[in-house]
Amino acid sequence: KFHCSGKVMSGPETTAFCVTIGLITIPSALFLGFVCPGLVHRNAGFMWVPLLTLVGVVTMVASLTICHASDPGIIPRKPAPVKTPPKIRNIPIPGSNSIERLRYCDTCHFYRSSRTHHCSDCNNCVEGFDHHCPWVGNCIAARNYRYFFCFLLSTSLTLAMVFGISCYYFILIKDDSSNNLGETIANSPVALGLMIYCGVVFLPVVCLLSYHINIISSGQTTKEEVKRIHEDSVNPYDHGCLLNWKYTLCGQRKPSLLPDLTEIVFRSSWCQDQEEEPSENRSLMGSSPPDEVAIEMDVVGPSPPPYETDHVTEEVSVSPLKSPTSSFPSLRSPTSSSNPVSDEAPTILSLIHISEPTRLLSISYAVFCLKKKKKNNKKI
């Protein structure tokens, strides 16, 4: 998703990202609003607790936002070829006897490298793909992996600190309440709730952090480790534990392969203005027909308009989308008769190319002429 005329992009799962932000900010606000004031009031030496908590919250929110709003390494799609190429292409690696196997992506229409995979959630091929994180709401790949690891590390440390300080504050309240557990819970419910929350969330976050510490040290990605790709072969991306950490967290970040999104958004809006311009020009030139058409009814005579044989009437379109004026042929019956009434009565075939209001008027006049003719025949 792109925002601010293409200047800001975000992952496809914005709702999950907002939920994660809420799970971070709401407990932190409760900790800063209820636990820290009571703790500092009892001992002024704990002034570092709210300051360190603010640093942890800012680090978590900033790393999560950057990870969500950055390009993970999306490779733009190419036009579909006329003939579908083979699924697998083997390319020899220069300087070695090994062969790199490239797979063709039927959606993005190009051959993927070994660490480029198609994400089913984002529906894009991502270079250096690690996994798709629903809590971040974006793919985790080479360009935003360092921010994801920073988010895990800051979250684990902040959870541990909040859990420990809340537990310490709960014990202080318990000592003041003469070891009465019910009175302690009533005096510090927020501290107890934070202890439970941090204890439940801390375990899976620390397990995930330990897992990523392991795969960084071995030079693998989550997808490679889960599928055991390098289990029976040499991992060409493993440069040793220290170099793996250096390349992963401190290496040069690859530039984005996406085009200038602001220019694309500007062109699309310009094209929409061009498409709307002809209709505006037509209205300014006065070529659009009037919205209302007045039809005057007159007394029926020997040759009332518009059925006079030598008179041609222009048709005015009722719909404003049609052409303003158009002429239609005379409505005189193809079969002539000596009777003036029957000579002037229109036939059904002559009413085919007439607009709806004129057609109704013509049919009414035709019925009138037939009734008048029938009445004259009875008198005879």
Image (spheres, rainbow, N blue to C red):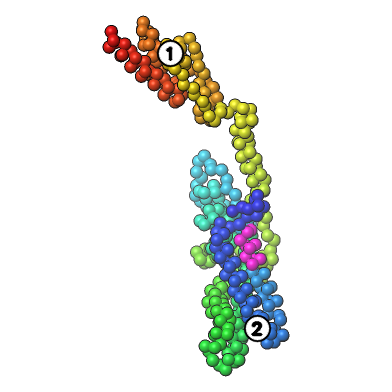
Q: Position of residue 198 (x, y in %)?
A: 56, 77
In screen coordinates, is 253 left or right of 91?
right
In the picture, measured across the screen, residue 376 lies left or right of residue 290, that is: left
Residue at left 72%, top 85%?
Answer: 44
Q: Residue 142's quadrant in the figure?
A: bottom right
Who is closer to the viewer here, 78 or 30? Answer: 30
Q: Which residues are magenta?
A: 61-70
254 sits to left or right of 195 = right
Which residue is disc 1 drawn over?
301
203 to 117, vertically: above or below: below
In this orientation, does residue 61 appear? yes
- Marking on residue 38: 2
Amino acid at circle 2: Gly
Q: Residue at x 68, y 60 (%)?
A: 253
Quick one: 28 or 203, which is closer to the camera?
28
Secondary structure of the residue carrying numbered label 1: loop
Tell me the SS state at disc 2. helix
Q: Residues within 10 Å of mark 2 (few under 14, many from 20)?
A: some
Q: Nearer the viewer, mark 2 or mark 1?
A: 1
